[in-house]
Image (cartoon, helix red, strand yellow):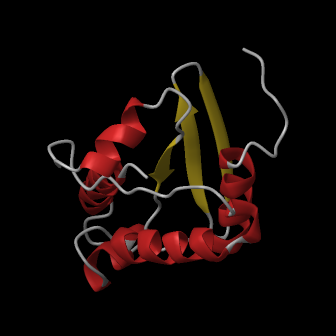
Amino acid sequence: MNGWWNEDYVKNACWQANKFFEGNAGPYVQACHTTDETGGLLDYQGRLVSELASSPECQGVQIVTMASPNQQDRNINETMSDPQHWTLMIDFAPGEDHQRWSLTQPTKVLNGEGGLGENAGRICTVAAGEGAVTVN
């Protein structure tokens, strides 16, 4: 999971929501002000990792979270150098129940959207290689 990208994405979303909704407390603004500075992303990522780890569809899938591009970790470096790894990016929408996500490989991008459990099942299905074969 590309945690640093996800966090940067939602911090920018909160900044834009604050600018756009000055004086109007829309759901983005409320989430950005009532949770942490990421609008609840860090909590969502933690819950998603728990769902992924407990999902039968994820059996045999290794879940590695990269918190920063400068993070020095052997497991992350090995995983990222494997051409078959999937990178998960969440287009987190503060205050929303459904979240959009993308799984990417060098020549593939697969997108989805749904609730927490639904997203975990779909992500696991793709990462485990159980879904349809895509040809680009």
Q: Residue furthest top?
A: 136
On the image, the x and y values in percent for residue 37 come to 22, 71
On the image, the x and y values in percent for residue 134 come to 78, 25
Q: Is residue 38 above or below residue 63?
A: below
On the image, the x and y values in percent for residue 102 come to 57, 43
Q: Is residue 44 above or below residue 35?
A: above
Left or right of residue 12, residue 116 in this image: right
Res. 60 visible in picture: yes
Q: Could you say which is closer to the camera, residue 61 or residue 30?
A: 61
On the image, the x and y values in percent for residue 109 come to 61, 30
The residue located at (30%, 56%) in the rendering is: 7
The residue located at (25%, 78%) in the rendering is: 36
Q: Could you say which is closer to the camera, residue 41 or residue 80?
A: 80
Left or right of residue 101, residue 70 in this image: left
Q: Residue furthest bottom?
A: 34
Left or right of residue 1, residue 109 in this image: right
| Quadrant position of residue 21 | bottom left
| Quadrant position of residue 122 | bottom right
Which image quarter holds the C terminus?
A: top right
The residue located at (30%, 82%) in the rendering is: 35
Left or right of residue 18, residue 55 in this image: right
Res. 27 visible in picture: no
Q: Could you say which is closer to the camera, residue 26 or residue 97?
A: 97
The residue located at (41%, 56%) in the rendering is: 64
